[in-house]
């Protein structure tokens, strides 16, 4: 049985652990004002603590998503202003360090991946257990960090918003990128006829992912050779988005992950058009995609890998709009 001295000693030990945890510092990238990539500052701040329903994750890798440099530039300031300072990033893979109150589904030491709303350009982040899943055994942490915001966005664009069915024709713009490369594979897995656009260096790569037709946009305007598609998934925006109206059949759908398409133009052509930048993937959705990866139905394509301190270089590369797969920040492991 515990005596008074044992109880007092135990409370001191618990207090010491709590104090140590609260004082632990971590490296993180923070943004203090809108601007260029130079606004990504490497700093040290206290490590967060998991709240009820959350876990603390040691981040091993985080994906660099285009929306993150757009937020940094202030592109969404009018309707969703940033609260400064903030830590960028949402897609991650890492190891559970600590579980918060009431958490029983995950344990310290488990390798996980998913989406955090607390920032992931950091050594640690806290995340809801509703938006993480166990990491696919076949993937490295760098590879697993590409899934949320890549495969999950592609899934939602194709199926939740695009309603893609087997036998339909889908055109994927930017088919070699972090979302596009997953979209090609998932559409093929669904049984759709897949058409992809890309630059000349990635034509064979996109074809290897399962696209039946690949258009080199630098050589051939897609609207001249592709017609009567049921769904267009645009991951590029800009002038590329403007060229996608002609290929869509009346009654078809345009889903852009880059910017809002013209609703006036959509009504004129009799199609449905919407903007979707990525939601909060559920654990179940993440598990489904992880299973497809472990079954080799879908493969992951890594782009460039940068250390955390070179986050600004990663953003500059992402802004260039060229490359293959997802850019990743490698943080630990």
Image (cartoon, rainbow, N blue to C red):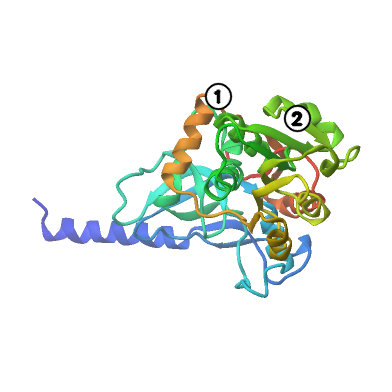
Q: Nearer the viewer, residue 291 or 143?
A: 291
Q: Position of residue 166 (x, y in %)?
A: 56, 33
The residue under the point 46% across, 36% down is: 288
Which element carries disc 1, helix, strand or loop?
Answer: loop
The residue under the point 28% across, 61% down is: 12
Side of 218 where 123 appears, left or right: left
Q: Is residue 81 above or below residue 120?
A: below
Residue 178, image quadrant = top right
Residue 207, image quadrant = top right
Q: Earlier in the sequence, mark 1 or mark 2?
A: 2
Side of 294 where 108 appears, left or right: left
Quadrant holding the C terminus: top right
The residue under the point 57% across, 41% down is: 164
Q: Position of residue 311 (x, y in %)?
A: 71, 52
Given this view, does label 1 or label 2 mark the residue nearer the observer? 2
Residue found at the very far bottom of the displayed protein:
78
Which element carries disc 2, helix, strand or loop?
Answer: strand
The residue under the point 83% across, 54% down is: 239
- Check disc 1: other Cα within 10 Å, few if <14, some if 14-19, many if 20+: few
Q: Position of residue 19 (x, y in %)?
A: 39, 62
- Check disc 2: other Cα within 10 Å, few if <14, some if 14-19, many if 20+: some
Q: Position of residue 16 (x, y in %)?
A: 35, 59
Q: Is residue 40 above or below residue 220?
A: below
Residue 101, image quadrant = bottom left
- Is residue 208 in view? yes
In the picture, the disc for residue 213 is 2
Q: Nearer the viewer, residue 183 or 147?
A: 183
In the picture, the disc for residue 190 is none
Q: Which residue is mark 1?
A: 296
Marks 1/2: CA–CA distance: 22 Å
């Amino acid at each position: 049985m515990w005596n008074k001295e044992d109880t007092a000693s135990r409370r001191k030990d618990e207090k010491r652990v709590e104090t140590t945890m609260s004082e632990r510092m971590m490296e993180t990238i923070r943004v203090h004002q809108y601007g260029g990539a130079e606004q990504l500052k490497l700093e040290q701040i206290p490590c967060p603590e998991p709240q009820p329903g959350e876990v603390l994750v040691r981040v091993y890798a985080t994906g660099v998503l285009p929306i993150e440099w757009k937020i940094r530039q202030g592109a969404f300031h009018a309707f969703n202003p940033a609260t400064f300072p903030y830590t960028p990033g949402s897609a991650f893979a890492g190891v559970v360090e600590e579980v918060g109150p009431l958490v029983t589904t995950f344990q310290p030491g488990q390798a996980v991946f998913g989406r955090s709303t607390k920032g992931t350009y950091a050594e640690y982040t806290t995340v809801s257990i509703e938006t993480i899943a166990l990491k696919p055994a076949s993937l490295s942490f760098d590879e697993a960090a590409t899934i949320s915001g890549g495969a999950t966005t592609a899934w939602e664009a194709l199926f939740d918003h695009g309603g893609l069915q087997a036998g339909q024709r889908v055109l994927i713009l930017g088919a070699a990128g972090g979302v596009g490369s997953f979209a090609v594979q998932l559409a093929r897995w669904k049984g759709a006829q897949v058409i992809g656009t890309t630059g000349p260096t990635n034509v064979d790569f996109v074809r290897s992912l399962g696209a039946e037709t690949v258009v080199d946009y630098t050589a051939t305007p897609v609207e001249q050779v592709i017609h009567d598609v049921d769904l267009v998934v645009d991951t590029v925006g800009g002038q590329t988005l403007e060229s996608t109206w002609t290929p869509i059949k009346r009654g078809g759908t345009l889903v852009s992950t880059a910017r809002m398409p013209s609703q006036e133009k959509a009504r004129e052509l009799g199609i449905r058009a919407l903007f979707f930048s990525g939601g909060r993937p559920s654990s179940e959705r993440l598990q489904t995609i992880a299973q497809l990866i472990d079954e080799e139905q879908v493969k992951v394509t890594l782009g460039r890998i940068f250390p955390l301190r070179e986050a600004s270089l990663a953003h500059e590369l992402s802004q260039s709009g060229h490359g293959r797969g997802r850019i990743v920040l490698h943080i630990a492991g």
